[in-house]
Image: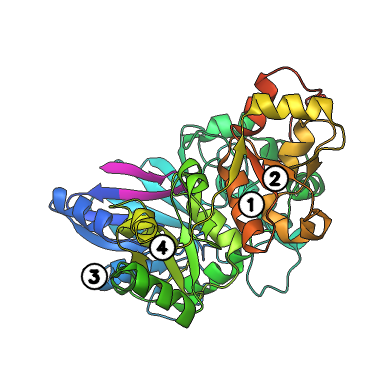
């Protein structure tokens, strides 16, 4: 028996490969099929089942394409109603994969169809659970993401409590927990950086499992939640209703366009120009009105948070060789309408003498000197509210990138405004959005809050350990 976690850091998502005696089960695959097919071929094995723990909200699963390419059966837990062929299992039903079994445990709460898959090994021992978004390491799934449910988040939290108590916590302490996500995902509020653990440890140390009553559990789980990213319900609908073939999406998105063709497509298609280069490279020169969301960070989740229309035509500016990666990572969160990329990158645009823009930057040291001498200086911190509340520079206001539109009216267009985040990734995103909206007097503080703090020259609020990472 082989169990492999296939973890994708930019989405904080875990898919699983399980093989026994030449048969394979895949759990919660990402959009692309190739890695799973190649992994099975390496073992000379056949993918028999694709198990889905629920209709995911934070990414588009690859279950449909993987099933079409391999003939594998898609399996959901009870109450799921997908709009494509799939097997809807009963609670407690077992599936044979080689010499092992996978048992379905219906665990509603995160969503109504949410299910945990229990791995029973060759000796009949309960070996591991694949808990999806029901149980994380250090946390449980948020109960406010169900699509078109008549139940309140309090109702769902109560169901989650019962699922945990009756289906999961009754299992042996040595059962391995394989969750659907780790730290960085917005599907939970305070997940561990660890991506697997023994159930016994979670019984002892997971805050949500310490509740003495359902009422206490509901209160603790719901405290600290913020509005989920706008793309979550849209991805959940795609996972339920179906989506375009990813190979066709990639083929369309990786069309190379000359600068002239790129500009024409931008105008004719009303396309968004998305520059995925590193923040420092974007600052040195970019196409006016382009939005910068760098591939090196949590690219897909920030795209999903900030670009509200999944059907928005997108034109890409990337480093050479990164075009397909960018298109694929967009497709993982449902942005299937990329229509091409700039051949030769930004350099090709600049070489032709076309209009460019830049971002003014300042070192943390120089910013600190200015801020210390002028208490009227304008500055905004675009970190999440939980980060800001934990610790920030006294006198700098919070304008979280997640909700930047809500703060634009309070930003003085005429005054020079300094912008920082934690390290520089999000501040450049914010500046690019503001510049596209007509704000000109913006300066990026390189190194962000971490560099500002390291100077030890500005007064900070007392540190408060955050109760939520959302």
Q: Is residue 83 above or below residue 278?
A: below
Residue 189 in the image: x percent, y percent?
Answer: 66, 45
Residue 257 in the image: x percent, y percent?
Answer: 31, 69
Q: Is residue 82 above or below residue 298?
A: below
Mark 3 or mark 2: which is in front? 2
Return the disc, 3 or 4, that comes first in the chain's sequence. Answer: 3
Question: Magenta part mainly helix, strand or loop?
Answer: strand
Identify the element where label 1 is drawn.
helix
Contact? badges 4 and 2 (CB < 8 Å): no
Q: Cα distance, mark 3 to mark 4?
A: 29 Å
Residue 316: numbered disc: 4
Contact? badges 4 and 1 (CB < 8 Å): no
Write down the residue under mark 2.
382
Check disc 2: other Cα within 10 Å, few if <14, some if 14-19, many if 20+.
Answer: many
Return the disc, 1 or 3, that comes first in the chain's sequence. Answer: 3
Q: Cα distance, mark 4 to mark 2?
A: 25 Å
Write down the residue under mark 3.
69
Mark 3 or mark 4: which is in front? 4
Residue 75 in the image: x percent, y percent?
Answer: 39, 67
Q: Which residues are magenta?
A: 1-17
């Amino acid at each position: 028996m082989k169990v492999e976690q296939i973890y994708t850091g930019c989405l904080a998502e875990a898919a699983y490969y399980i093989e026994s005696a030449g048969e394979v089960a895949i759990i919660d695959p990402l959009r692309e099929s190739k890695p799973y097919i190649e992994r099975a071929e390496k073992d000379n094995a056949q993918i028999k089942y694709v198990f889905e723990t629920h209709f995911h909200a934070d990414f588009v699963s690859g279950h449909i394409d993987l099933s079409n390419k391999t003939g594998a059966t898609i399996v959901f837990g009870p109450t799921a109603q997908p709009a494509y062929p799939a097997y809807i299992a009963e609670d407690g039903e077992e599936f044979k994969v080689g010499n092992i079994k996978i048992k379905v445990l219906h665990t509603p709460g995160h969503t109504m169809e949410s299910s945990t898959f229990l791995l029973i090994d060759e000796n009949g021992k309960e070996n591991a659970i694949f808990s999806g978004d029901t149980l994380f390491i250090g946390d449980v799934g948020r109960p406010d993401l169900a699509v078109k449910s008549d139940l309140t988040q309090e109702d769902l939290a109560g169901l989650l409590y019962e699922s945990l108590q009756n289906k999961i916590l009754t299992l042996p302490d040595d059962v391995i927990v394989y969750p659907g996500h780790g730290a960085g995902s917005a599907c939970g509020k305070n997940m561990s950086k660890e991506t697997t653990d023994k159930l016994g440890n979670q019984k002892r140390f997971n805050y949500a499992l310490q509740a003495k009553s359902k009422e206490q559990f509901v209160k603790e789980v719901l405290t600290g939640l913020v509005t989920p990213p706008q793309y979550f319900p849209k991805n959940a609908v795609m996972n339920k209703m179906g989506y375009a073939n990813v190979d066709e999406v990639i083929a369309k998105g990786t069309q190379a366009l000359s600068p002239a063709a790129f500009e024409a497509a931008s105008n004719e298609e009303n396309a968004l120009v998305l520059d995925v280069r590193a923040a420092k490279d974007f600052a040195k020169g970019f196409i006016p009105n382009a939005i910068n969301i760098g591939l090196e960070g949590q690219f897909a989740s920030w795209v999903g948070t900030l670009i509200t229309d999944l059907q928005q035509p997108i034109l890409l500016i990337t480093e050479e060789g990164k075009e397909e990666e960018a298109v694929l990572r967009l497709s993982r969160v449902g942005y299937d309408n990329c229509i091409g990329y700039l051949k030769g990158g930004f350099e090709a645009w600049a070489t032709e003498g076309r209009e460019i823009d830049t971002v003014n930057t300042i070192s943390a040291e120089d910013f600190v000197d200015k801020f210390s001498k002028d208490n009227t200086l304008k500055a905004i911190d675009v970190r999440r509210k939980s980060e800001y509340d934990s610790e920030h520079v006294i006198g700098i206001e919070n304008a979280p990138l997640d909700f930047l539109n809500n703060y634009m009216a309070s930003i003085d267009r005429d005054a020079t405004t300094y912008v920082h985040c934690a390290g520089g990734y999000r501040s450049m995103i914010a500046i690019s959005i503001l510049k596209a909206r007509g704000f000109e007097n913006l300066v990026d503080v390189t190194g962000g809050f971490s560099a500002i703090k390291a100077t030890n020259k500005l007064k900070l609020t007392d540190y408060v350990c955050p109760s939520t990472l959302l």
